[in-house]
Amino acid sequence: MGKSRKILISTGFSAVTLAAFCCPSFFKTTSPALDGKIPGASAASIHIEMADPASRTRKLDLLAKDLDAKDDRTRLEAISELSNIRDERAIDLLVDRLSIEKEPILRVRILGSLRWLGTAKSEEAIIRTMNQDHDPAVRAEAVQCLPTQRSERSVDAAIARLPKEPAVEVREAIIFRLDDRRNKKMMDSLARWYAKERDPHLKATIMRTITAKPM
């Protein structure tokens, strides 16, 4: 098993996300989604912005402009701030930016913000990215962001993507994500895919998954 696969298995993060952790000078952010802060650490700032609609509107106007900045750092900081604002417009701004952002690492950052915000619209954008993004590392990160523990829609989307996904690392991410939901649907889907999977490492992973005893 390659080193990158060992990292994926042991941490649950893709290489793209790990790269963000390894470059703190560039990826420093106030968002709990990347800094590892507990959700409650940002509760005060969220409450303040939500308590003053006029200030929130002005803030969102400024962040909307920052999202269009040419400078990557400015866009990153805007994405980080938007992840701390539980507001429909904030989610819309992130979703819209995700569809046009050219930098893969910033698309990954947006995915983390959408996962943190956790709405149906966020989930829809994550699923769309898993299915459509041209970068396999970003697609793999989208898989990691799927709320499979609480959403049958995400489980169904991951199952549907598996036979269509050309990249081995993304298929691997899907298999590990489905392993979070050890139900009959997941087991049957992986069992059917086992016969079609050509990568020997993934075949072994699928076999371990479907034969493992529940903990």
Image: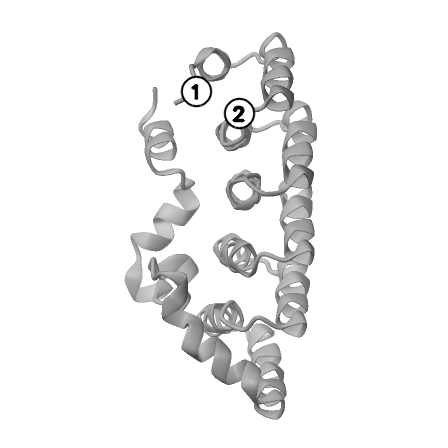
- N-terminal label among 1 and 2: 2
Provide the secondary structure element on which disc 1 rests.
Answer: loop
Residue 212 in the image, given as x and y percentages of width and height: 43, 14
Within 10 Å of disc 2 (Cα), the crowding (few <14, some 14-19, many 20+) is some
Which amino acid, mark 2?
Arg
111 shown above or below 51: above
Which amino acid, mark 1?
Pro
Residue furthest to the top: 195
Pick the quarter of the image with the C terminus.
top left
Residue with the mark numbered 2: 182
Does the residue at mark 1 contact the one at mark 2 (Cβ under 8 Å)?
yes
Res 214 label: 1
Residue 3 in the image, given as x and y percentages of width and height: 31, 28
Residue closest to the eye, 93 or 27? 93
Q: Is residue 28 left or right of residue 86?
A: left
Residue furthest to the front: 215
147 shown above or below 90: above
Q: Name the residue located 62 percent from the left edge and 49 percent from the top edge.
A: 126
